[in-house]
Image: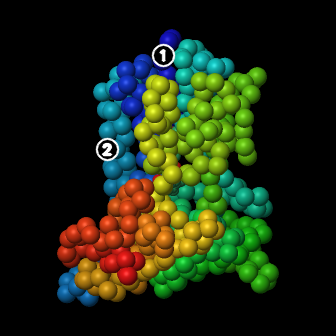
Amino acid sequence: MNFDIAIIGGGPGGYNAAEKAAKLGMQVVLFEKEDLGGTCLNRGCMPTKALIHSAEAYESMLHAESLGIKTGEVTYDFAAMHARKAQVVEELRKGVEKLMKAGKIQVVYGQAQIAGPGVVTCGGETYEVKDIIIATGSKVAYPPIPGIREEGVYNSRDILEGEGKMFRSLIIIGGGVVGVECASIYRALGCEVTVLEAADHILPVMDKEIAQRLTMMLKKRGCKVEAKAMVQKIEGTPGSMTVTYLDKKGKETVVTAEGVLAAAGRCANVDGLFAEGVEIEMFKNAIVGDEVGRTSIPHIYVIGDAKAKNIQLAHVAEAQGANAVAVIAGKEPPIDMSVVPSCVYTNPEIAAVGVTEDQAKAMGIMPKAVKFLTGANGKCLIENTDSGYVKLVTDSANGRILGAQLVCPRATDMIGELALAVQKGITAEGLHAVIHPHPTFTEMISGAAALAEG
Ligand code: FAD
């Protein structure tokens, strides 16, 4: 069978690339071994956010009286929360299926293998194509900790699929985005949560101040958070698990809980992807690609989580897909990959874009950093939010906005405006000159811009 392009993997990288390629008039075949939508839609971004929504609604109802609302006993049904999550996922997946149909994209369900340049096999069939985009995503990575693959230790997939798993107590190994979002969900539902992070703060790739603020807020909500915690071993049986770790002073410490969640990172999913004899450049078991995804084999591209040294985010995978398809079609890549917003959907939300104050200094720029506190925003007071901030980092030489870090309600929605400001080189003065509606959380952005303007 002949096609212009084969895309392997139907996650946000793959299905968006397929749609773009079809719009450019290419004959597209898309291979997916599980479900369209990939990790993001089926067991990542969307299920976590659906559960976070339910958990936060429950938590806010527990405090309804402070808003003048009288309720009876507030309880929850975890299976029903998961059923709602499944409905959301199903609807989104059907949307992707329709999109593929509308683009006349041939979707082939099965494990695809690259037999050589321009040749893909799947389910006993051979497909001949001009170009291949690898979008096979990632899978859970396990650090070499004795007991981590034993029963009683779950991964994000185990707890997000089906009816989920509820625990009265849970130890989360890894304080990255997945770890802290799961901590937020379980804590909001009354579970005793302990987060163990090996680095010197949770959210290791984010600004230290953000991590400190989140640690404080998680602790205020009753989570235990231990940084510089080196897990030594995991023992026990489901329902009664023990984790032994060395704490920040090197002291052996033991914690027990009903379950353990392994959330210590993800690695590229390249299992069985290449037939024998296909040699492609790899780095740490992920596929090396240049800025538009060209690999060491001509006409084979890589995008998303399968790409080495990539930022593992759905919107990054999607943007890389758009760029790779454009390059294959002989066009300029349409998306600027230099400014990537990242978000954490905890309560309060966290979002960041561009550089931090320290990063600006390391680049030889004299930064000016200002913070607008949530306590000075009317909407935050109305909604009883925790203390947080909108921080802007500008270039003191010309006022340009270089970066922003937000810890506040709707941070994940507001970061888009700041990504635009960073990408377009807008100054604090320019941002402050834009009217922001009142009363809104976005007024914190113009407030911070006013502070930066001086
Ligand atoms: P994937 O989404 O992993 O899709 C790859 C697809 O390829 C899979 O469907 C797989 O079945 C298929 N595949 C693999 N090998 C083959 C093969 N040989 N043949 C055929 N098919 C194959 N990112 C965000 O931006 N925001 C979030 O809020 C967010 N939350 C997350 C929460 C969790 C719990 C997790 C685990 C991840 C989260 N992410 C989030 C990360 C996001 O899910 C990934 O960055 C994104 O899914 C990567 O997209 P992708 O297309 O590269 O790969």
> Which of the 4 quarters of the picture holds residue 407?
bottom left
SS category of the residue bearing label 2: helix
Of tags 2 and 1, the one toward the viewer is: 1
Q: Which quarter of the picture shows residue 54? A: bottom left
- C-alpha separation, residue under disc 2 versus residue under disc 1: 29 Å
What residue is shown at x 77% (from left), y 84% (from top)?
249
Among numbered discs 2 and 1, the one appearing first in the sequence: 1
Residue 172 position (above or below residue 5): below
- Give 187 or 216, whichever is nearer the viewer: 216
Which labelled disc corresponds to residue 91?
A: 2
Query: Which amino acid does the dot numbered 2 rest on?
Result: Glu
- Identify the residue at the far top of this view: 1
Q: Residue 218 vs residue 237: left or right? A: left
Residue at image position (74%, 75%) is 245
Mark 1 crowd level (few <14, some 14–19, many ≥20, 10 Å Cα): some
Left or right: 128 in relation to 386: right
Percent across and percent down for residue 228 are: 70, 76
Badge 1 is on which residue? 3
Q: Residue at x 48, y 16 (%)?
A: 3
Circle 2: is it few (<14), some (14-19), or many (20+) Cα within 10 Å?
A: few
Marks 2,1: beta carbons within 8 A: no
Specify the quadrant that holds the C terminus. Answer: bottom left
Amino acid, disc 1? Phe
Residue 98 in view, yes or no:
yes
